[in-house]
Image: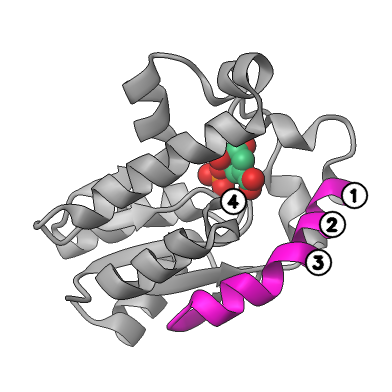
Amino acid sequence: MSHHIVLVGMMGAGKTTVGGRLARALDRPFVDSDVQVEQRTARTVREIFETDGEAAYRALESEVLADALASEEPAVIAAAGGTILDESNRRRMRDFGTVVFLEAKPSDLVGRVGGQDHRPLLRDDPEGVLEEMDRVRRHLYEQTADVVVDVSTRSPDEVVAEIVRLVGS
Ligand code: S3P
C-alpha cells in the first residue's frame, strides 16, 4: 500500500519545487498540501492563520493530507512543514507512502524562505523561528522518513535524481 511519494521537511527545503519536478519525471500527479488548503477554503494560508488561528489551519492541513493519501492514483505529495507534528499524519504517511525527508539546517534554509504569503509563522525572525522548529521537529522528520536526502548541497534537479535513485519509479 506504499504507493505515494511524500516529501516532508522544513519550510524552504524545496518540497514544492522538487515535488513538481519529481512528479513530472515519474509522470504522476503532484499534490501540494498548502495549495489544496487554499483551493478548498478559497483563502490564503495567512488569512486562515490570522482569522481562525493555527489549530484551525492544522486541522485543514491534516484533512487535505488524509484525502491526498487516500487517493488510489500514485502521486507525489508535498506535505507542508508542520504536518509531521500530528501523530496520525505521521502514521498515515508511512502507511500510504514512501516518506522522503528533504534535510537542511536552518542556516541553509533561511535564505530560501522569503517572500511567500503562506508562511506567516516566520514573521520578523525567520532564522530564530526555523531554529526552534528544527529543534522540535527534526527527530519527527527523521523517525517518519524512509529516506533522507541532504538538499543543502544539491540543486533541485539533483535532489529529484537522488530521490528517483533511492525510491525508484
Ligand atoms: C508551515 C509550513 C508552511 C505552511 C505554514 C506552516 C510550518 O508550508 O503550511 O506556513 O509550520 O512549517 P511549507 O512547508 O510548504 O512552506
Magenta highlight on residue 137: yes
In the rendered image, the quadrant that contains the C terminus is: bottom left
Kind of element beneath mark 4: loop
Marks 1 and 4, the one that precedes in the sequence: 4
Mark 1 sits on what residue? 128
Contact, CB < 8 Å: mark 2 with mark 3? yes
Contact, CB < 8 Å: mark 1 with mark 4? no
Contact, CB < 8 Å: mark 4 with mark 2? no
Q: CA distance from mark 2 to mark 1?
A: 6 Å
Tell me the quarter of the picture where residue 124 sits. top right
Q: Nearer the viewer, residue 90 or 161?
A: 90
Q: Residues within 10 Å of mark 2 (few under 14, many from 20)?
A: few
Residue 64 x %, y %: 34, 41
Mark 4 sits on what residue? 82
Q: Nearer the viewer, residue 45 or 115?
A: 45
Marks 1 and 3, the one that precedes in the sequence: 1
Kind of element beneath mark 1: helix
Name the chief secondary structure element in magenta.
helix
Ligand 1 is within 8 Å of the C-beta of the residue at disc 4: yes
Magenta highlight on residue 109: no
Residue at 9% over, 57% down: 72
Q: What's drawn in magenta, residue-wise? A: 128-148
Marks 4 and 2, the one that precedes in the sequence: 4
Left or right side of 63 for 46: right
Contact, CB < 8 Å: mark 2 with mark 1? yes
